[in-house]
Image (cartoon, grey):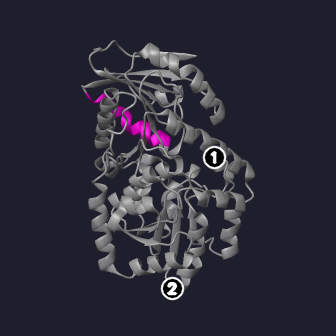
Amino acid sequence: MATQDGNSRDSSMMHLFLNCLAASAGAGLTYVRNIVPHLASRTDLRATILLTPALRVEFGTFSNVSFVEMETAKNSAKRFWQEQKLLPGFIRHSGADVLISTGNFALRNSPIPQILLSGNSLYTSEDFSRDVRSRGDYGLWLDTRIKGFLAKQSLRWADCTVAPSNAFAQELRRWSGVATTVAIHHGFDRAIFLQEQAPLPEEVQSKLDSGKDALRLLFVSHYNYYRNFETLLRAMPWLRECLSGQKLRLYLTCKFRSEENPGSYHAEATAALVQELGISEEVVELGSIPYGSLYQVYKACNLYVTAAYAETFAHPVVEAMASGLPVIASDIAAHHEICGQAAMYFSRFSAEELALRIVQVARSDSLRRQLADRGSARSQDFSWEKHVSEIVDLARKLANIPATDKSLLGVAV
């Protein structure tokens, strides 16, 4: 059962229909929470947003945005078929001009032009496929293969696909053979992020305070395989040796317990690796941090590190740059694109090279200042207002282009 709210609106404005049912955790929630206020602030369009009741309560009432609430299946396959069946009716009833599908999967035979937002690199990542097989997690391997098939079909069903980086747009074109994929960077509200001053939970603050005389490394992520925690952990013994007795802490915004992380990832082997390497004192599991308090964690640390082998944008590196932290990142294309010269890079599976990069930055005041200054400047290049404007411009262009002429869309970034 779906319920709708909202007022009657000027029919002369462009009308967008956003399917946000897939936004339930992580990047999906971040995306919807950021774009809705920017859509609502515009006077040149109206929007109908399909979302779950749990997400609807986060937003107020807007003159140009209406919400359609629908409970959805937690199983992604069931949700996919639910959307294929019900979405066309919602769209026709709304009278929208362009559909924006935000959850990696498109509507087959959309009654109006459709923009697909694709942001899951696991469907295209050979590293992820090898990693999952090496762990013996064949259920996840099969689930990813099935979703990957539907994601590839979705690229063909959509009139245009938007990726959050040029790196991922190129990967999607290579993987699918579909040329109508463009890149529009995700945004970042730097001023709002830096103003967030919500206090940290007492337990978290105590853990941060206990490492004040240590070199404090930070990695922001819930636990999963593709963020490559194992390489981070294997770098710690190298660091202890290189730093000659200096205290060391690696702060993580997760815990190595499967039940405390989203998704079906098994964290027990990683927890065992911490014990095997003898680094339980150095590795500090803070657990999940509310977004309004996250800046406090960045401020308390010295360096930001990520060994991820699959990313499409990587919001935490932008947050780290905005917070003035030097960034040390794996050498994947998305990190190079987002950070540019504001980071030091290492081979993504080399714990030794990661340790050497950390030591190189930690021992050079001038290099730390240089990276911090470059990062602060780079973080200002990302804006949710700009992102929404480019999506709206693309929708206007798409609505006026005949279905057979998609070559005029171009790349936005």
Crowding at dot 2, Cα within 10 Å, few <14 / some 14-19 / many 20+, comes out as some
Asked if residue 39 lies in the magenta stretch, the reply is yes
Q: Nearer the viewer, residue 105 or 3?
A: 105
Q: Mark 1 or mark 2: name the one nearer the start of the chain.
A: 2
Residue 250 vertical placement versus 142 (above, below): below
The residue wearing badge 2 is 242
Query: Residue 13's x, y, as percent?
Result: 27, 20
Residue 252 vertical placement versus 103 (above, below): below
Q: Could you say which disc has been placed on residue 74 in the image?
A: none
Q: Residue furthest bottom?
A: 244
Query: Residue 324's x, y, as percent?
Result: 33, 63
The residue wearing badge 1 is 263
Residue bounds of the magenta highlight = 28-42
> Is 272 situated left or right of 199 in this image?
right
Query: Which residue is depicted at the point 52% across and 55% down?
Result: 221
Query: Residue 141's x, y, as percent?
Result: 69, 51
